Amino acid sequence: MSTSKKKKDLVYAITENGTHKPITQPAKLSMLSILAYASVGLPYSMQLSINAFYTNYFLLDVAKVSPSYNAGALFTSRVIDAITDPIGGYFFQRFSTKWGKMRPWILFSAPLVAVTYFCLWIIPNVSEVGKFVYYFIFHSLFWTFMTATRIPHTALTVYIAISQKERDVLTQYRTLMEAGGLLLSIALHTAVMVLFKAEGSKCTPNNSENNTNGTNFTNFSNDSTTAMPGIHELNVIGSNVKNAYMVSAGIVAILCVATAIFLFFNVREVADVIESDKRSFVESSKMIIKYKPFLILTVATVASVLATQLLVPTLIAVLIKGTPMWLLFICAALGANTVACGYLMPWAMLPVCIDAFMLKTGTKPVEIFYTFFFLGAKVAQAIYTGLVQVALAASNFDSRYCDQPESVSTALRILAGGIPGVIMLISTVCLFFYPIGEKRTQEIEKQLQQLRESSANTNDSSGDTLDLDTSTEF
C-alpha cells in the first residue's frame, strides 16, 4: 500500500451486483457510528428487563390469566424462541443485499418487535382460553422477531470494524447501553405507574409470632394496614394499571424503531478479505461445533451467564433482616464486577475466535457463530429460571405473605452466593484452557492485515489463492 494511505485500512463494501469491491475506510470509527450501533441495545435491554420483572405479575394479577395457562404460554414461547435461533442463523447466513447482510434485518424487524412488544401488555376482552392463545401467539412472535434483531445486531460488530480494538470499543458501548437500559426501564416503568396512580399488589402480613426470625417483605408495600378500597376504586385502579402498562410499552416500542433507524443510516457495513461462508448451514455448523476454541468459550460463557443470572436474588437479600450493611456493600461491589465481566468479556472474545477460525478454514460463518452463542446463553437462562423456581418452592416461599420463613433467606443466600461462586470457578477453569491469548490475537491481526494488503495488490483480478494460516492446530 502507498504511504499516503498509512492511516487507512483496506476493507470491502458490498456493491449493488453482490460483489465485493475494495475500498478504504478511516482507521477509527466515528463516535456517531459507535453510538448508533450501541443505541439499539438500549430498548433491547429495556424490553428484557420489563419482561423479566413484570410479566408474571401482569398476566396473573392484571390480565387474570390462570397460573397454569400463564406458565404454559411463557414456557412454550421460550421453547419456540430457542428453536428460531438456528432457523434464523440459516437465513442470516444466506441473506445479502446492497445495504449489507445485517443492517436490513435490524431495520425491518424493529417495527415487528415494537408492535408485538406493545401487544404483550394489552388485555383482550376474551375468555381465559382466548387470553392463553393471545399471549402465547404474541410472546412467541415477540421472541422470534427479537432473534431477527438481536443476532444480526451483535454479529454486526464483525462487519463494521476490522480491528479488535474497535470491536472491543463497540462491545463496551453496547454493553454500557444495555446496562443503562436496565436502569432506565425500572425508572421509566415506575414513573409511569406513579403518573397513572397505579399501585402494585401488596403482600399480607401473617402476624405470626413464630416467624420473628424469618424474612420480612413488608417494605415492599406502602401501607399494609390501609382499608380495602371499594368496588368503584378497584375499577379505577385496574383501569389505571392497564393504561400504565400500555403507555410504558408504547414508549419502549418507539425507542426500538427510532434506534434501528438511527443505526441503519449511520453505520456502514463492510466485509473483510474472506467473504461470508458459502457452505451449507449444516456443514458450517458441524465445523463450528468441532472447533475447540469456540466450544471452550461457549461453555465458559454459559457458566458465566448462569452465575450472573443467579446473582439477581442479591437485590432481594438487601431487604433481608440480619445482614450486616458492610457485607452487603462488599457483595454488591463484587457482584457488579462479576456481572460486568460475565456479560462483556465473552462478547469481546468471540470476534477474535471467529477471525482465528477464518484463518484456519478460509470461511467466515459469522452469523452461525453468534447463533450458537445466543443459544448457549438462552440455555443458561432457562436453567436459572428453573433453579430459582425450585429453590423458592422447596423453601416454602408464599408470595401472598410479607413474612417468609427463614428457609427462604437461606435459599436466597445460597442462590446469590455459593452456587454462583462454584459456577464462576468452572467458567474460570474453561478460560484457563482457552488457546487464543493476547499474543495469538496480535498474530491473527497481523496475518489478516497481510491478506488485505496482498488482496489489494492483486486488485481482485488475478484469482490467486489467499495464503491462509492452517498450521495452527486449533
Image: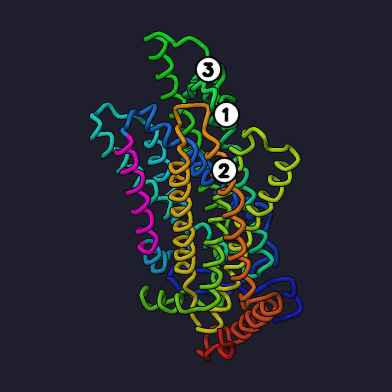
Q: Is residue 153 magenta?
A: no
Say what amino acid the circle numbered 1 marks. Asn
Residue at (62%, 64%) from the top-left corner? 425
Say what amino acid the circle numbered 3 marks. Ser
Q: Is residue 28 left or right of residue 304?
A: right
Q: Which residues are magenta?
A: 67-87
State the predominant SS element of the stretch in magenta: helix
Q: Is residue 183 left or right of residue 396?
A: right
* Above or below, comparing residue 210 to residue 43 in the picture: above
Say which residue label 1 marks.
Answer: 216
* Residue 124, x across and y down, in percent: 30, 29
* Above or below, comparing residue 84 to residue 368 in the picture: above
| Distance between the alpha carbons at the discs numbered 2 and 3 | 25 Å
Residue 239's quadrant in the figure?
Answer: top left
Query: Which of pointers 2 and 3 lies earlier in the amino acid sequence?
Result: 3
Residue at (60%, 72%) from the top-left corner? 352
Say what amino acid the circle numbered 2 marks. Thr
* Residue 293, x across and y down, in percent: 55, 76
Compare residues 128 and 134 and report the one nearer the observer: 128
**Disc 3 on helix, strand or loop?**
loop
Query: Which of pointers 1 and 3 lies earlier in the amino acid sequence?
Result: 1
Query: Which of pointers 1 and 2 lies earlier in the amino acid sequence?
Result: 1
